[in-house]
Amino acid sequence: MLYYSLVFFVVAIIAGLLGFGGIAGAASGIAQILFFIFIVLFVLSLIFGRRRL
């Protein structure tokens, strides 16, 4: 999921440099959503993964 977030971030940067503002904004929004989902799942896995020890 972090990989896809980085891919959308790169797409947003390239689209922004080329002048495609709408596409850059959409890709940036998708990248932010995927990154926050990654962070939430990572924290949850840290919390519930330690219960086994």
Image (spheres, helix red, strand yellow):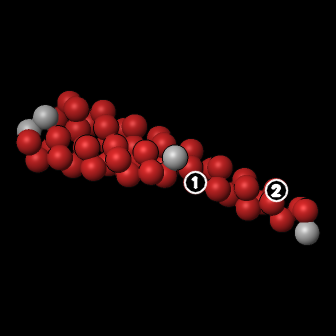
The residue shown at (27%, 50%) is 10
Residue nearest the viewer, comparing 42 with 21: 42
- Residue 52 on image: x %, y %: 90, 62
Which residue has dot 1 on it?
39
Q: Earlier in the sequence, mark 1 or mark 2?
A: 1
Q: Are marks 1 and 2 in contact (CB under 8 Å)?
A: no
Residue furthest top in the image: 22
Quadrant of the rendering where the C terminus is positioned: bottom right
Residue furthest bottom in the image: 53
The kind of residue on which mark 1 rests is Ile
The residue shown at (17%, 46%) is 14
- Residue 36 on image: x %, y %: 52, 48
Is 34 left or right of 24, judged from the image as shown? right
Above or below: residue 30 compared with residue 3:
above
Q: Please give the label number shown on residue 48.
A: 2
Is 47 left or right of 10, judged from the image as shown? right
Residue 32 shows in this picture = no
- Residue 16 on image: x %, y %: 15, 44
Residue nearest the viewer, comparing 40 with 8: 8
Q: Please give the label number shown on residue 5.
A: none
Where disc 2 sits, the SS reads helix
Q: Residues within 10 Å of mark 2 (few under 14, many from 20)?
A: few
The kind of residue on which mark 2 rests is Phe
Q: CA distance from mark 1 to mark 2?
A: 14 Å
Where disc 1 sits, the SS reads helix
Above or below: residue 36 compared with residue 43:
above
- Residue 35 on image: x %, y %: 48, 49
Is 3 left or right of 19, judged from the image as shown? right
Q: Residues within 10 Å of mark 1 (few under 14, many from 20)?
A: some
Residue 18 shows in this picture = yes
Is 4 left or right of 28, judged from the image as shown? right
